[in-house]
Image (cartoon, grey):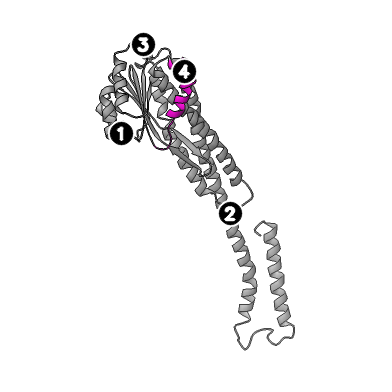
Amino acid sequence: MECELPDDTCRAALKRLRDMGDGRFAWVRLQDPSEGELLQLAEELGLHPLAVEDALHGRQRPKRERFGDVLAVALKPLRYVEEDTAVETGDVMVFVGPRSVLTVSHGPIDPCAEAARRLDADPRMLRLGPWAVLHAVLDVAVDAYGDAARKVRATLDRLEDEVFSTSRVDHTQRIYSLKREVREFRDAVQPLVPVFQGLVGGHGEKDDLPKIAPYIRDVADHLHRTDIEVRTLDELLDTVLGAQQARVGTWQNDDMRRISAWAAIFAIPTMVAGVYGMNFEHMPELGWTYGYPLAVALMALASGALYRAFRRNGWL
């Protein structure tokens, strides 16, 4: 049985499930619920007040906690929007009880709908009980992590090509922006790794889910690969950022060399013209017929010689 709203019908069905012994369970899905909606279900599902508080406010770091016979798992689903170079995240809490599952979603990213679709298409998994819902939600979220990592890698490859191209465009701001998104990506992926280790690593839950454990381990393997990829992306962004800053420094040095070279070239005619512009009466060659052409020729030859020297040394 699956309920999307905590109405009286859903609560009545939850009560009936407690009296049944046929292996059926209920899955209640909530999207951005109010406090009243959560409190209505808290008693029926046996939720701890702290669990209700976490589910109500969202924005939880990925974690795993036990509240009696209810396991609570918090995760941050996400997607990468290539057009905006942005990582969009949401918040999901999954409460797994003996005969029921409650999922509470906040934000624009909700993996529960896709998880329900997958379970509807695979009755064999549904027969594994409430833990199948936890597996399905985690599987959808981790698949989205992998897809986002591939898209971020493609964006980084394009950015890297642009940084090392011949164009003199400073991509520092774009690199910082992408690095900030990758850090948000890491905040969603890294804390989830020990959650999986707790689920299948012999910390109390393994005895509760012997049949679902192999599937959880498979998802954990995918998460581990994504975690490594995200760490690699973060390190590559540091390298690309360093390369961009080095290129900017090189461009600035080139500009300063050009400015200095042209300043030296113009210094010669400025000096000569300045000397003969002092208007003293007794100066050499002031009355010489060829004095002016000689001065102009001297300025041109000296400037031309400096220009050739600077060109030969790559300053111009």
Q: Secondary structure at mark 4?
A: helix
Q: CA distance from mark 2 to mark 3?
A: 74 Å
Residue type beneath disc 2:
Trp
The crowd level at tag 2 (other Cα within 10 Å; few <14, some 14-19, many 20+) is: few
Q: Secondary structure at mark 1?
A: helix
Residue under label 3: 22
Quadrant of the image containing the N terminus: top left
Residue toward you, 194 or 129: 129
User: Mark 4 or mark 2: which is in front?
Assistant: 4
Q: Is residue 45 at all visible to an observer of this figure?
A: no
Q: CA distance from mark 1 to mark 4?
A: 29 Å
Q: Residue at x 50, y 24 (%)?
A: 222
Check the image and report above or below for 308 versus 169.
below
Q: CA distance from mark 1 to mark 2?
A: 53 Å
Q: Main secondary structure of the magenta part?
A: helix
In the rendered structure, does residue 118 fall within the stretch colored magenta?
yes
User: Mark 1 or mark 4: which is in front?
Assistant: 1
Q: CA distance from mark 4 to mark 2?
A: 54 Å
Residue toward you, 88 or 11: 11
Query: In the image, residue 216 lies at what x, y percent?
Result: 44, 19
- For residue 70, which numbered disc appears in the image? none
The crowd level at tag 1 (other Cα within 10 Å; few <14, some 14-19, many 20+) is: many
Magenta residues, as a range? Answer: 107-126
Residue under label 2: 251
Residue type beneath disc 3:
Asp
Classify residue 149 as left or right of residue 75. right
For marks 4 and 3 on the same chain, the one whose residue lies earlier in the sequence: 3
Query: In the image, residue 106 lies at what x, y percent?
Result: 37, 35
- For residue 215, which numbered disc appears in the image? 4
Figure quadrant of residue 39: top left
